[in-house]
Amino acid sequence: MLSIKDLHASVEGKEILKGLNLEVKKGEVHAIMGPNGSGKSTLASVLAGREDYEVTQGSVILDNQDLLDLEPHERAAEGLFLAFQYPVEIPGVSNINFLKTAINNIREYHGEEPMTAKDFLKLVKEKQKLVELSGQLASRSVNEGFSGGEKKRNEIFQMAMLNPKLAILDETDSGLDIDALRIVANGVNELRSKDNGFIVITHYQRLLDYIVPDVVHVLYKGKIVKSGPKELAMELEEKGYDWLKESELA
Amino acid sequence: MSNTTAISKKDAFIANFMKRPKADLSSNHQSIREEALQALTILDLPTSRDEYWKYTRLTSITKQEYHHIEVKLDALQDEWKVEGLEANLMVFANGYYQPHLSNIIDQNVSILTLDQARIEAYDVVDKHFDQYVNAQNEIFTALNTAFNHTGVFVHVSKNEVVEHPIHIIDVVQGESALVVPRNLFVVDQSAKAQIIHSIVSNGGEKAFVNGVSEIVVGENASVEYQMIQTIGDTNQQIQTTQVTQANNSKFTTGAFTFNGQLVRNNLNILVEGTGCETHLNGVYLLDGKMHVDNHSVVDHLMPHCESNENYKGVITDKATGVFNGKVFVRPDAQKINAFQSNQNILLSDDATINSKPELEIYADDVKCSHGSTTGQLNQEGLFYLESRGVKPQEARKLMINAFADEALSEVGVDTLKEKLEVMIADRCQQF
């Protein structure tokens, strides 16, 4: 479904991704781990189309569509979703109003009629249960005054509403206590299906106890240097990354 | 030589006002008018060398010729009204009262034209008319005092509440109309009133509206005065609002400006009582070559008061905004909380804002803050919305809309708030 080939990307002239390859098939969850500065968040930003990142080489294909040719909103319409590491607070824009606009813009992109108000509210009701988000939070301004946990739950709520083909969770577990982590992970697990895929970017193995990946990759200096089954995450947690660096250098 | 030219320019401008026959006034009001006329012989037209007018050039107003155009309106357009609001309606066209379109529901208060009030509520008018504005030092106020058409008089007696909001609609029509409305609102002790003031255009071109309102907020009284300016792209307005607040009173006001070639709002609030609450809000949404200038003064004379000022502007194309907000805290005014904010979003390279929030504090136990921000839309916020599938233009609209809507929090009439939300959203479609 997603195929990243030889991806090179720079920020302010500095190359961060240096030939990254990754294949995600439908129904799979891939975890990407790696030390600070290895390029994890850059990968997420490049895929979502953040402005400051320049792709110098390579391709990113989602179901026959090259994402790199598209604007951020078009990538979303093609089925890509990025859960932000730091969700943005937008005072005055209500969550509900914003989601309605997003859903209807995506439907318009596919030549579909806008969703009726009734269907939309039904969907909201159904999906907010998934992440135990109260109706009050759902109707407030986007992330304004939300706690860290509420912000991350709101990301998963939005993901559930948009039902993407491929979701990238960028350090969604950072700053979460164990209860919030469980709620977020449950939400993701409920959404897993044979038709979609996930890339879970994380620093800690802890999240992978709850969202069990099919494949774990280690990103180091802008490349994937090792891939393996879920046990690889445990090994990284125990040994750190140094042994990999050494073997990489060897 | 240059002096002579200046004088003749002023005289030519004043001659526009003099075209209308003088009203038949009581001797007292005739003397007020004569004092204003006297002041006009001394006062000059301001230039950009005057600090008060530094960023607003008045040539576009003063160089034109105007006429007093008496009209009878056939009907009110729906967009001038507030949908779903049952209101006491007072309608004027080019300054002339339109009794057939006006409608007073509440009988426990006096809602009259100022002309009627000079006869029917003589004592109240006599006590308050022209007692608060400064016709001796301000030329546009002097012009209004000397030559006003008429306007709205509201008197709410002690302990009375105006159940339905009072909606004043000032319509501008025809070519080069000179409109000089004068309003007086007197709200006595423990009384309450909500007033909406719309200034609209019915295909009017090149008009000049020189309005003055005096608002007297009695002890423990509550007054809300919201002004909606949709005056039209070639029309100009200078609107002076003078407010005085007695002990424990509450005054809330807003200026919502959607268009106008040149609009200048002078809002002066004298907080003479202790324990008062004052809210000032404004939104200006400007494109083309519009010029909108909001000058406000909140003068705290007494302790234990709170004032809250929040003006927001969105400016694009070659439009210009001016904000000058002054808060005085006098030596006796201890325990004052005064907050002042002016925020602007500039959407084009040629858009301009001159923003000057000022605090002058002469007391030592006060909490005051002021701030002004000017910037572009939050890029991180835009990317967040777009990354969820919202089209870039929609994302912009959502954010501009949200920014402006924040200044609506003190609008107490729900139907008006809804109307303003829709008007702001519609206006944002054009940015």
Image (cartoon, coloured by chain):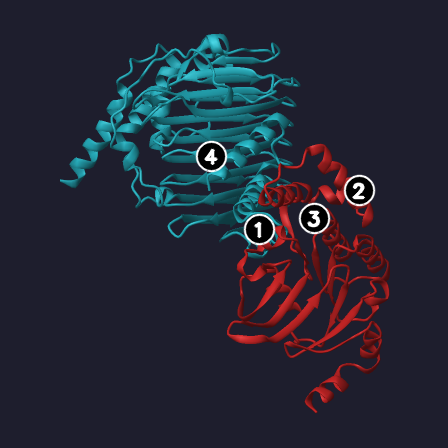
Chain colours: A red, B cyan
Q: Please, which chain is the residue tagged with disc 2 on?
A: A
Q: What secondary structure is marked by label 4?
A: strand
Spatial separation of the CA atoms under disc 4 and disc 1:
25 Å
Q: Please, which chain is the residue tagged with disc 1 on?
A: B
Structural crowding at the residue carrying mark 3, measured as other residues with C-alpha within 10 Å and reported as few (<14), some (14–19) or many (≥20):
many
**Is residue B51 toward the left or the right of residue B76 in the image?**
left
Question: Badges 2 and 3: C-beta atoms under 8 Å apart?
Answer: no
Spatial separation of the CA atoms under disc 4 and disc 2:
42 Å
Q: Mark 3 — residue?
A: A162
Q: What secondary structure is marked by label 1?
A: strand
Spatial separation of the CA atoms under disc 2 and disc 3:
13 Å
Q: Which one is closest to the eye, mark 1 or mark 2?
A: 2
Point out the image quarter for the N terminus of chain B: top left
Q: Mark 4 — residue?
A: B257
**Is residue B40 toward the left or the right of residue B351 in the image?**
left
Q: Is residue A157 visible?
A: yes
User: Are discs 4 and 3 both within one chain?
Assistant: no
Location of residue B18 by image quarter: top left
Q: Amino acid at mark 1?
A: Ser
Q: Amino acid at mark 3?
A: Leu
Spatial separation of the CA atoms under disc 4 and disc 3:
38 Å
Q: What secondary structure is marked by label 2?
A: helix
Above or below residue B316? Residue B82 is above
Q: Mark 2 — residue?
A: A126
